Structure formats: C-alpha cells, structure tokens
Image (tube, rainbow, N blue to C red):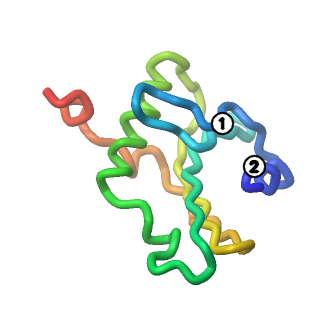
Amino acid sequence: MTLWLLWLRGWDLVAWRLRQGRFELDLLVCRGSELRLLEVKARGPRAWVGADLALGPDQRLRLQRALRSYLDRVPWPGGISFQRACWAGWRMRLHPPEAWDGLKVPREKLTGR
C-alpha cells in the first residue's frame, strides 16, 4: 500500500524488501536524481507502542549499514534521503525526509574497526 501511495506522488521503485546480509531495506524509491530509503512500520490502531516510536537508534544504525552496503555495490550519483512511513490501522503518516548526511556515521563505526 505504501508503494502505491508513493507511486501516486511520482516515486519509482528501485528495490523492495531488499536483503543486505542479515538486514532488510523495506523500500528504495527514486524520483529524478534522489534515492530514498523508506522504513515502513505498521501497528494496529490500538497498539501499546505506535509505529512512530518503533525505530530506535540501533535499528537506524543497522539501516545505515545495509544502505551503505547496497551503495557500495550500486553507486547512486544523486541525493540520498531516509523517510519513515508509519501505519496505524488504515492511516499512514509519512515523516519528514531526513538527508543522508543526517544519518552518516564514520566508516570505522560501520565496520566495527
């Protein structure tokens, strides 16, 4: 459903549920020269913890590692951003996109050296 809504907004699919080692990238979409990683979270309408709160710092780091691994194999010449799509029942909330620079961590931290 998220992909369909993004398609209506002019985004094209690059990859869906892409496995990068033990990590998974939910959606990679592009529009023009921008590549966007979307992390999709869904919870029931009366869930104890909403989908908005389901992405912690550790998971952000795992997403960063997976995206960096993908970009090492498939370089992207344009801009790169990250966005969360949160579902509660049938309602979706798209969080504001974050620039790739806001997610960058030193390469040493990614490789564990």
Residue behind mark 2? 3
Classify mark 2: helix, strand or loop.
helix
Residue behind mark 1? 16
What residue is at 33 percent from the left and 45 percent from the top?
61
Image position, residue 38 (x, y; %)? 58, 49
Q: Is residue 99 left or right of residue 17?
A: left
Image position, residue 63 (x, y; %)? 42, 42
Question: In the image shown, does 11 or 92 lie closer to the viewer?
Answer: 92
Q: Is residue 101 left or right of residue 109?
A: right
Residue 104 in the image: above or below residue 20? below
Q: On the rendered image, what quadrant is the N terminus found in?
A: bottom right
Question: In the image shown, does 84 or 10 lie closer to the viewer?
Answer: 84
Image position, residue 46 (x, y; %)? 57, 83
Quadrant of res 31: top right
Q: Are marks 2 and 1 in contact (CB under 8 Å)?
A: yes
How many marks are shown on the rendered structure?
A: 2
**How many other residues sit within 10 Å of disc 2, few (<14), some (14-19) or many (≥20)?**
some
Q: Amino acid at mark 1?
A: Trp
Q: Amino acid at mark 2?
A: Leu
**How many other residues sit within 10 Å of disc 1, few (<14), some (14-19) or many (≥20)?**
some
Extreme residue toward the right, this view? 8
